[in-house]
Each structure stands twice: as C-alpha cells, then as structure tokens.
Image: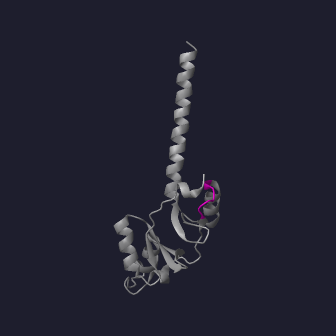
Amino acid sequence: MPVSEICNRKVVVVRRGDTALEAARLMRQHHVGNVLVIEERNGDNVPVGIVTDRDLVVEIMAPGLDQQAITAGDIMVPELATVKENVGIFEAIQYMRGKGVRRLPVVDESGGLTGILTLDDLLELLAEELHELAKLVKHEQKKETLNRR
C-alpha cells in the first residue's frame, strides 16, 4: 500500500518569514504538533523545513526569546526528510526509523507537497490491522466450534 493512501492531506503550513508565534497559533488552531515550512517553486508548494511544538519550547520558550522576532525559518529543521507518495508504507517506516523522524512530508514527483505521514497515522493503521487479525481468529474459532459439534 502506498503512503498516499493513509497520509493526512490537510497539512498546516507556514513560510520562512512567518513568526514562531504564528506557527504556534496555527498548531493550536488546527490541533497539530507541527507546521511545515514551504516555498513556492514553479507553482508547487515545496516543503523545505518543519517546526514542531518541541522546537518552540526548546528553542524559544525555554531560553525566553521573543516569539514575534523569531521566524519559522530561524528555528525550522532544515534537513527535511520527505517521501514520494507512491512509496510503500513499510519502506516509509524504515526510512523514518533510519532518519529518526516521527513526521514525514509526502511529495509528488515534482517535489510538491501532497500530505504528511506521521507516527500517529502508522499506529492507527497498525491498530486497525491487528483488530482485523483478531476478528479472523475469533471467526475461525466460531467456525471450528460449529463444524466439530
């Protein structure tokens, strides 16, 4: 199954020049733990960085910096790992583990943002798959009970 089937298509984004305060407000408004920093290139919104709630706490709040003076571009994680939308889920998980990231922007062939794959998305998928397996076991037990009377 490609990541495009389970990734979240509603991605909260900011530009490099937007303030850290604006990023925090967007996270709160949309109930998310990150915003992607994008640039427009050839008509596409291309992800170039990410700012997480942890970045805001560690980089701005803890040292007592001015949230309105610091921009998303100042604190974003610049070496952004992305994945193409046709990559399989298992391959994406391996990539996330190798890079040590919990969030992976999903891009099309030209690098344009199409979604984001998160650890939460993967855990939800795994829970659904395990639930289906558990139902299979229960069904097999019922079937055997009926057939062996």
Residue 122 left/right relative to 24: right
Name the residue nearer the viewer: 113 or 128: 113
Give the residue displayed 54% in from the left and 42% down from the top. 130
Which quarter shows the C terminus? top right
Q: How many marks?
A: 0
| 66 up-or-down from 31: above or below | below
> Can you give x and y, in whole percent of width and height, for residue 65 in the image?
40, 84
> Can you give x and y, in whole percent of width and height, for residue 44 in the image?
53, 75
Residue 98 left/right relative to 54: right
Name the residue nearer the viewer: 108 or 59: 108
Q: Main secondary structure of the magenta part?
A: loop
| 54 up-or-down from 66: above or below | above
Q: Range of the magenta residues?
A: 84-89
Q: Is 121 contained in the magenta span? A: no
Give the residue displayed 41% in from the left and 79% down from the top. 20
Give the residue displayed 60% in from the left and 65% down from the top. 83
